[in-house]
Amino acid sequence: MSKEVGKKLAQEAGSREISRIIMRGSSVKMGMKNRLFRFVPARFQWVIPFAQQNLKIKPPKLPELKFKLPGRFRQNQNSEKQSQQLAPEIEIGTVPEVIQLVQPLYSKYDCVRGNPLSCEVAQQTLEAKSQAKYCRQCGFPVPLAPETKIRGDRGTYQIEKLLRHRGMGRLYEAIQLSDRQPVILKEYVLPKRYFNSEEIRQRKDLFRLVGGINLADGRIQDQRLISPWEAVAPLREERCYLVTKGQIDAFPTLSSYLLETGPFTSPQVRQVLDQVLQSLEFLHEQKFRLRSGALKQGIIHGNLSLDSLIFVPNVQGFFIYLCDLALWENFGQALLSDSTYSSPGQDLKALGYIAFYLLVGHTFNPQTEQELDPRIEDDWPLGVHLGLKDFILNLIGLGTQKFETAQVARQTLLKLSGEWWIGDGSVIPSGTPETVIVKTLEKKRRQRTRILAFLLGILGLLLLALLIWWAMVTRQQKAMAKDPVCCIDKVASIPLGKFTYTASVNGTWSYVLQQPNLIAPGRTLEQDLQQRLQPEDPSEPPKYTFRYVPEPSSTEAIAKVLSGETDFAITNLANARTAYDNLIHTQIGYREFAYDGIVVFVSFSYSRRENGLPQRLNGSITFEQLRQLYTGKITNWQEVGGPNLPVKLYIPNEEEALRIFEQRVLKDERAIAEFHNLLRAQTTGDSLVRIPATITPLSTFNMLRTVIRDFEDRNIGSIGFATLSKVFGQCSVYPLALSQGNQPPVSPLVRNLDNQPISPLTDLCNNKGSYRPNVTAFSQNHYPLAYSLAVIYPRDNRLPSVGEKFAEIITTLEVQNLLDRAGLIPIYRESAPSGVP
């Protein structure tokens, strides 16, 4: 007896060991293929499944490798029962349909609600502490907090609110940040209490491959099947996400609708059956392409229940949508070789039970607390349509007819006799005269026509109002538009004499005006302007000159204008408005002539881009992250999803840039105070030890050189910011896209070819001519740190209008062209007229 038990134990151990080895081998191979698959450009990824499908190229299976195991672990090939215990091989081209629960959902968590996905304590934990990760009672991962961002391959999504749990996950309302369109995000949890790191990785690899389906021929066909837009499986999280576009996925399931409304009528159940069978016919018989690119002929739903059918009301009744296919819904459970959901017939059987429960109104007998059984006559409701009852029993497999396919079942349903079924679910009893039937149908048709006409009338009025509004706005814009003067010599009534103007010594205008080589080799914009302002005859003395005398700051520059010591000044309008808000339009006039902005950058090494900060940060950063960095709350890039590198902070020694950074990024006084504390060196209590400042001010070009050296020589992840006019074209750093609040990230640079933002894969050094400033974002104030440059002059009729005239000079197309070459974004970008260099 003991020998027999020992033999069975050995056989069982051998079977399990072989299953484990094959499953691990399959997972490793799947992961390797998935990684290789990513190296194929997106537009050529179709070649791999096409070759496998049409050229019959199949990867070798593990049994073909003929590896040998010790004899005591060999599988008994004659035992069908043991062979079924082997896990199936997972390949890019073949994805297992069979996924089955092996134990109650998350039974290791002692949750008061039983299912930790719907635990109220977890939600309360998150509300009490927004940074909480686990429920304070059972330890299960808490829901995602509002404003959490999920980055996928097809977009970035921001959580708006938690809706509820459904099936194996939690549902959230979210938006796609790129276009602010609504999406529904379903979160699946892979807690470490259930899975080790290797198992989580394997399941995430599988999740990316099976998370969604599309028709193989590329057609878009709405058969009321909710297929995910994207499957997201972050590497460092215990969670995966499915994203569906629109909000249909948030509608109630039949289960929840049934609790609110009670039993369905026979016509309503017939309508449910008709729609679901039509969707199943589509699902079972079409050829699909999985997210991996693999082709698959027919897919089994495998998870059909009251909780996987969505009820969407409409004018004529309702639509039923299918969701939560087993293909991706149960990816986190054990993979087995057999299943109760292995054929189309099992989907039909599940649908039969659904119809039975809808007629009764619940799934359990409230008196006996036993599950309702369609084989028991007393469990059926009174008054059910007899033809419908027989049809449901046939679906379940308890009747005289067996349906092989959903198509056959639906054809049988449509032939049901005894009552006239109308598309909105209403019924005309048998025996009704034909004239009455025709009148009834005609009446309903007229009702629908009136409703449609009313809706079209409302839509027409809205379109008319929109057209009128658009015409008024266009006329107003045309009226406000002012064509620029082409050339300097076309500017009339320039006052005669010698004039002085000023700006900040370290500001944008000083750099653009006096930096050599921006306009032409060895020349500055100042020299070029002076030459263009000279009379045509060199022997004639100049009629007017503009001498530039810089001041230490823009505040002092504007003060010189107010005191009359200089004729006008040039500064950024953001600082001018802040410092002299009450004087703008009263004592100070201004005219904008170009745009600039602050860009935030990190080191950029194209050869080491895989582990560089641009790649790991996805090329962007949020204002909140910047606040935490520049107030000392983040000291390692790992804290924001980057590599394991210490943070080093730099700022420019430019008063204009610092003031804008404080106003728009740091904002509140506390953050600004913390920022200034990091700027100052500190001493300990005994004044013997001096702590160096955490933030280092440098000139822009020294900062650019230091940031790349920190990364390449010292293994430090440095970050700094400066004006775009100084950073553009300096390829040792990468300007990050910026995201403020709920807005999507906006890049300061775009590609010339398609006007799309640059990415960390863009070679900024070797392809300098392939990108340019994001003119639209700066000119329309979409870039959060953009600002305009303006000429500031006194409003005094007693003084010559030299400031206004200088503004006219630098807004001519001739000078705007020069400003463009100098690194600014001019307000007019038309090409200079012929003859103008």
Image: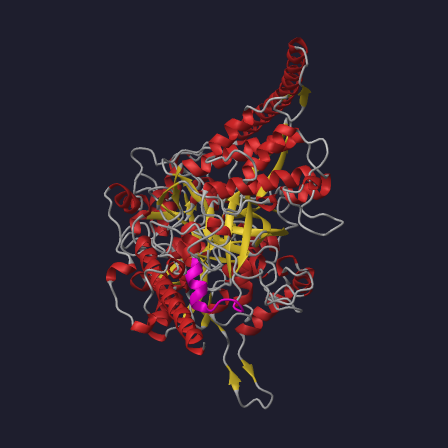
Q: Is 275 situated left or right of 265 in this image?
A: left
Which residue extends farthest front?
1
Let me know if residue 657 is in the magenta part. no
Q: How many marks?
A: 0
Q: Is 440 situated left or right of 507 in this image?
A: right
Magenta-drawn stretch, dominant element (helix, strand or loop) = helix
Q: Check the image and tell me how it is coloured.
A: secondary structure
Q: Residue at x 44, y 58 (%)?
A: 335
In terms of depth relative to the viewer, which is nearer, 406 or 333?
A: 406
* Vertical position of residue 193 compared to residue 546: above or below: below
Q: Residue at x 66, y 60 (%)?
A: 119
Q: Is 119 situated left or right of 500 in this image?
A: right
Quadrant of image for the N terminus: bottom left
Residue 570 in sight here: no
Q: Is 813 situated left or right of 667 in this image?
A: left
Q: Residue at x 57, y 70 (%)?
A: 676
x and y percentages locating residue 266 in the rendered image: 66, 31
Q: Which residues are magenta?
A: 192-204
Which residue extends farthest right?
367
Quadrant of image for the C terminus: top left
x and y percentages locating residue 802 in the rendered image: 50, 43
x and y percentages locating residue 747 in the rendered image: 44, 51
Residue 198 in sight here: yes
* Vertical position of residue 607 compared to residue 419: above or below: below
x and y percentages locating residue 419 in the rendered image: 64, 21
Let me know if residue 196 is in the magenta part. yes
In terms of depth relative to the viewer, which is nearer, 741 or 295?
A: 295
In terms of depth relative to the viewer, which is nearer, 123 or 167?
A: 167
